Image (cartoon, rainbow, N blue to C red):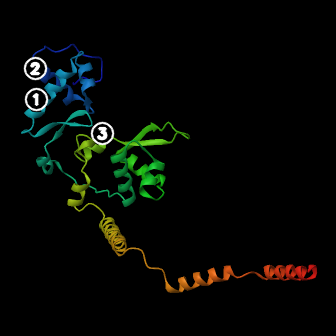
Amino acid sequence: MSEDPHSDSAEPPEASPDAIERALEATLFAAEEPLSVDALADHLGGLEKQQVRDRLKALSEHYQSRGVHLVERGKRWHFETAPDLAHLLRREKEQVRRLSRAATEVLAIIAYHEPVSRAEIESIRGVQTSAGTLDALMEAGWIKLAGRREVPGRPVIYATTPEFLDHFGLTSRRDLPGMDELRASGLLDPVDDAFEEAMGTAQDEEAADSSAEAEEGPDAPDGDQDGDQLGADAHSDAPSEEQADEGAINATSQGIDG
């Protein structure tokens, strides 16, 4: 009967690398869930963490050609069957559960921007996110509550889980594909690509028009405008009706005085 690896720490194994590897192998084999380096070091009597890391890497290389592999997912280690033997272990047809487009977008945003709040998700998507979408991802075990943002209102923030990394075969979030890889794989929305291309074309045309206007120089003043300006100047030189009346009164006054 195997012992629970989460029970009280065992006596530290002998210091030889082989003894440490055997202890790690037995512990991981009996564990009900993946274990971190810290958990393994504590369970094996306080081994140095660097020793544990080195022996785990050696064990992982040892199992590369075996029917089971020792892998690290989200900084936790566990055994899993070799991918090329998966077909031998299937006894029932797998039920494929497809995510909606909204759920896929939300999952991608959380994976690339975590930790992220619901308001931040909606800001990136440009539309509201229903609670059902987040619930579906949490039910699948791919996202989790990661605390609260220390801002007014203290909104809940979300992050991915080790199960997300395990399902997609990622060692860490650094293994997520970049934009160039997504575009080469045809996973980017062609509508988005077309929109970006159209915007780029429009900007090029606008830049070309601006360059052409700069080369032509400012337009010459219109003839009608010159005429209007001359007429306005002439009109401004002519005395107003009040000025004419005032001149006549002054002339009459001078005649009387004379």
Amino acid at dot 3: Pro
Task: Say above or below: 90 vs 193.
Answer: above
Earlier sequence position, callout 2 versus callout 1: 2
- The picture places residue 249, in percent across and down from the top left corner, at 87, 81
At numbered mark 1, what does the secondary structure look like: helix, strand or loop? helix
Q: Which residue is mark 1?
A: 58
Residue at point 9%, 38% (across, down): 64
Observer able to see residue 77: yes
How much space separates mark 3 and mark 1, taking CA atoms?
Answer: 23 Å
Observer able to see residue 93: no
Classed neighbour count for the residue bearing mark 2: other residues with Cα under 10 Å, few (<14), some (14–19), many (≥20) = some
Q: Which residue is mark 2?
A: 17
Residue at point 26%, 55% (across, down): 179
Classed neighbour count for the residue bearing mark 3: other residues with Cα under 10 Å, few (<14), some (14–19), many (≥20) = some
Q: Are marks 3 and 2 in contact (CB under 8 Å)?
A: no
- The picture places residue 233, in percent across and down from the top left corner, at 62, 80
How much space separates mark 3 and mark 2, taking CA atoms?
Answer: 28 Å
Amino acid at dot 2: Pro
Residue at point 42%, 54% (across, down): 124
Q: Are marks 2 and 1 in contact (CB under 8 Å)?
A: yes
96 sits to left or right of 83: right
Q: Which residue is mark 3?
A: 162
Earlier sequence position, callout 3 versus callout 1: 1
How much space separates mark 2 and mark 1, taking CA atoms?
Answer: 10 Å
At numbered mark 3, what does the secondary structure look like: helix, strand or loop? helix
Earlier sequence position, callout 3 versus callout 2: 2
Q: Tell which of 87 and 218 is nearer to you.
A: 218
221 sits to left or right of 169: right
Q: Tell which of 41 and 251 is nearer to you.
A: 251
Which of the 4 quarters of the picture holds residue 133?
bottom left
Q: Tell which of 15 and 245 is nearer to you.
A: 245
- Residue that sits furthest to the left in the current view: 65
